[in-house]
C-alpha cells in the first residue's frame, strides 16, 4: 500500500507503536507502564509504577524499602469517579494505634496531578485507629497512592488506578466565599469513653488550584487553598495535616479520636494567603451529638 494512501488512524497507530517501542528500548520503566487501552486512553493496573511515582519516591523516601504486599494499609477509591474535582478516598489502616507500634505518618499522592502530594498527615496514638476519609482532585487518569509510615520506620503502600480527569481545572463553586474559613465539626455516632470515635471536620474554602478560569473575566483564578490543618482533643494532638490544592474544595476529613473524658475538639487552620481560622466543638461522653463549631478568624 502506498504510504500516502494509508488512512490517518492507521498512520497514527503506527507512530504510537513506534514511539512505545522506542521507549521500551530506552527505558525499562516505560516498557512496564506505558500502554494504552482501546481508543488510545491510558490504562494501567493498580500495582503499576509510573515515572512520576519513581521521581516522587526518590525525593520523599530515598532508597527506603516500601512494602506493597503486607496489607497493613488499604486505599479505597472508585475505579471510575463521577467527578474529577471530588473523588472520594478512604484510607483504612489494619493496625491499631498502640504505643508499641502505630501509624506515624500517612502520605497521600496523585501521580499525575500538578501538585502530586495531596496530604501529609502526622498522627499520634490519640486517634486510636488511623483511618481517614477525604475527597481529592484528580487531573487525569492516574495512580493514587497511600504510603503509611510506622513508628518503627517501616513503610507500607497501597495504590489504585483511577479513570477520571479534569479535577484541577473544573469550574469553581464561588457560592460560599462569605463563609471563608468557617470550620465545622460533626460527631455522626455515639461517643464512647476510651474507644475510637468517628468525627468529621470541614473547612469552608474554595481551595483554588490556579488552573480554574473565572467565567466572567475568563482569567485564571489565583491559587488559594488550605495549607495546614491541626486537630486536637482536650489539648492533646490528634493529627497535623500539611495539604495542597489536590484536596477538593471545602476540605473535609473523617477521622477517629479516643476521648478519655469530656473535652473539646479543636482545629487550627492556615491557608496559602496566610489566613488563620479555628473551630471547636465540646464533646460530651455518653450521648450522640452532631453540631457545628463556631469559626474564629484571627
Image: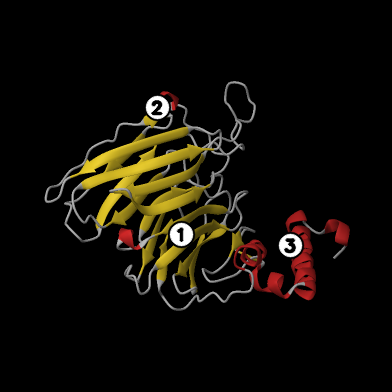
Which residue is rendered at x = 57% and y = 48% of the image?
A: 139
Q: Within 10 Å of the Cα at label 1, are there few (<14), some (14-19), or many (20+) other Cα atoms?
A: few
**Disc 2 to disc 3, how far (Cα)?**
51 Å
10 Å neighbourhood of mark 3: few (<14), some, or many (≥20)? few
Estimate the x, y position of residue 118 in percent, counting from the top left: 52, 52
Q: Mark 2 sits on what residue?
A: 179
Q: Residues within 10 Å of mark 2 (few under 14, many from 20)?
A: few
The reply, left or right, for residue 298 in relation to residue 14 is left
Quadrant showing the C terminus: top left
Residue at 57 percent across and 25 percent down: it is 215
Q: Which residue is mark 3?
A: 13
171 on left or right of 283: right
- Gap in angstroms between the C-alphas marked 3 and 1: 27 Å
Visible residue check, residue 143: yes
Residue at the spot 31% in from the left edge and 63% down from the top edge: 129
Given contact means CB atoms under 8 Å apart, are the residues at marks 2 and 1 in contact?
no
| Of marks 2 and 1, the one in the foreground | 2
Amino acid at each position: 500500500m502506498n504510504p500516502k494512501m494509508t488512512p490517518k488512524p492507521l498512520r497514527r497507530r503506527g507512530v504510537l507503536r513506534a514511539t512505545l517501542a522506542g521507549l521500551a528500548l530506552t527505558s525499562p520503566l516505560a516498557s512496564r507502564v506505558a500502554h494504552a487501552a482501546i481508543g488510545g486512553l491510558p490504562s494501567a493496573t493498580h500495582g503499576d509504577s509510573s515515572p512520576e511515582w519513581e521521581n516522587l519516591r526518590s525525593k520523599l523516601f530515598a532508597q527506603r524499602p516500601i512494602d506493597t504486599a503486607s496489607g497493613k494499609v488499604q486505599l479505597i477509591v472508585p475505579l471510575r469517579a463521577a467527578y474529577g474535582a471530588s473523588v472520594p478516598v478512604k484510607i483504612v489502616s489494619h493496625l491499631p494505634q498502640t504505643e508499641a507500634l502505630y501509624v506515624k505518618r500517612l502520605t497521600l499522592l496523585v501521580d499525575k496531578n500538578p501538585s502530586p502530594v495531596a496530604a501529609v498527615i502526622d498522627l499520634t496514638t490519640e486517634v486510636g485507629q488511623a483511618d481517614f476519609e477525604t475527597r481529592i482532585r484528580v487531573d487525569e487518569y492516574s495512580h493514587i497512592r497511600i504510603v503509611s509510615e510506622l513508628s518503627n520506620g517501616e513503610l507500607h503502600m497501597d495504590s489504585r488506578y483511577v479513570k477520571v480527569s479534569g479535577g484541577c481545572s473544573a469550574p469553581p463553586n464561588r457560592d460560599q466565599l462569605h463563609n471563608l474559613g468557617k470550620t465545622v465539626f460533626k460527631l455522626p455516632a455515639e461517643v464512647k469513653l476510651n474507644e475510637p470515635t468517628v468525627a468529621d471536620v470541614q473547612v469552608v474554602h474554595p481551595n483554588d488550584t490556579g488552573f480554574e478560569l473565572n467565567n466572567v473575566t475568563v482569567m485564571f483564578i489565583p491559587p488559594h487553598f488550605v495549607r495546614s490543618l491541626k486537630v486536637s482533643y482536650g489539648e492533646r494532638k490528634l493529627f497535623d495535616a500539611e495539604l495542597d490544592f489536590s484536596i477538593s474544595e471545602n476540605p473535609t476529613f473523617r477521622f477517629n479520636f479516643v476521648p478519655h473524658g469530656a473535652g473539646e475538639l479543636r482545629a487550627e487552620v492556615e491557608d496559602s494567603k496566610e489566613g488563620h481560622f479555628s473551630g471547636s466543638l465540646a464533646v460530651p461522653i455518653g450521648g450522640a451529638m452532631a453540631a457545628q463549631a463556631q469559626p474564629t478568624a484571627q
